[in-house]
Amino acid sequence: MNPTRPPPAGLQTPGFAHYSVAWSPFHNSRIALASAANFGLVGNGRLHMVSLIPGVGGSSAVKLDKQYESQDAVYDVAWSEIHENQLVTGSGDGTIKLWDVMLNDFPIRSWHEHSREVFSVDWSNIKKDTFASSSWDGNVKLWTPEMPRSVTTLHAHLSCVYQAIFSPHQPDILATCSTDGTMKIFDLRSPSYATGPATNSFTHPLSAAVLTVPASGTELLTLDWNKYQPFVLATAGVDKMVKVWDCRMVQSAQPGAQAVGGLCEVQLPGHEYAVRKVQWSPHRPDILATASYDMTCRIWSSNPSAGGSNLLHVHDPHTEFVAGCSWSLYDEGLLASCGWDGKLFVFRA
């Protein structure tokens, strides 16, 4: 990557542990931070709006522009793909809120259908009027900002759904990961219920996935779609291993059919504790970043040159769990990391 790295720009929000960070898809200097008091265990949360200020010689600074209070922990944040000033958050009380950064104090809309914590939100970059939420209640819900209720509910897993994300290649494909150690891929065009001894559509409804990948023997905390290869995904979780999967078999699955499989192409060992976040680079098909409870954010290549290492860089100024990392969509090689130490860093890989 870049051998001469300028020092990272940093910002601290005392009393609030960070859970997620996201760059704006419209402005190359806007960053949103989701955070929680008392490490998200009890108490309120905050949404922080941050600006990156370019400096001399490649250095930069980070400035807190404003913050919004929430009655419960804010676990995730996603920018709108249709409105440059709006973003959505998921909270510990099961609520989802839509915010406008041009307004102060209060959200412009709020929804409450999940019965447990909302742990992830994701805005589709193809079907730009739609976003998804996933919850500890096992459900994934699809929303549009104008509708007072969710438009679709997927009973995705029988346990906590840590993350649900849309494919950046096909508007009706969505992937999830869960406490049960599986990654599932759903085709929203062919909703149906799974059948089997563990479920029935009356007492334990479970939506049928077109592909189920048994990715780990422990909790699967995060996943991401490769931005260049339509059926390549990365997963990571409690087993400390980052894995790259080829899931092309979903192409041949018939509507309503369920397939189990997925080919693990690459394994990336190195983290010492659970991996909380994985994200592919928006600029390179073989580069991904991870954030871990070992207090590091790491940059990897899934396809290194002959004799080269998969591990390209270790970013380690955090002093607590690193919970989030995010690539800049405009500036290649620029990342943000955030953690339970209440610190945000912007650095170049």
Image (cartoon, rainbow, N blue to C red):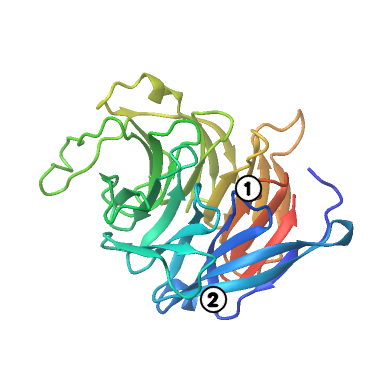
Residue sitting at x 85%, y 56%: 58
Q: Which residue is mark 1?
A: 289
* Image x and y of residue 144, in percent: 36, 49
**Residue 167 seen in the figure:** yes
The disc labelled 1 sits on which kind of residue?
A: Ala
For residue 75, above or below residue 138: below
How many dots with numbers? 2
**Nearer to the camera, 125 or 105:** 105
* Image x and y of residue 334, in percent: 72, 51
Q: Earlier in the sequence, mark 1 or mark 2?
A: 2
Between marks 1 and 2, how big is the CA–CA gap? 24 Å
Residue sitting at x 76%, y 28%: 306
Place residue 273 in its image quadrant: bottom right
* Image x and y of residue 271, in percent: 60, 53
For residue 32, above or below residue 300: below
Give me the disc on residue 16. 2
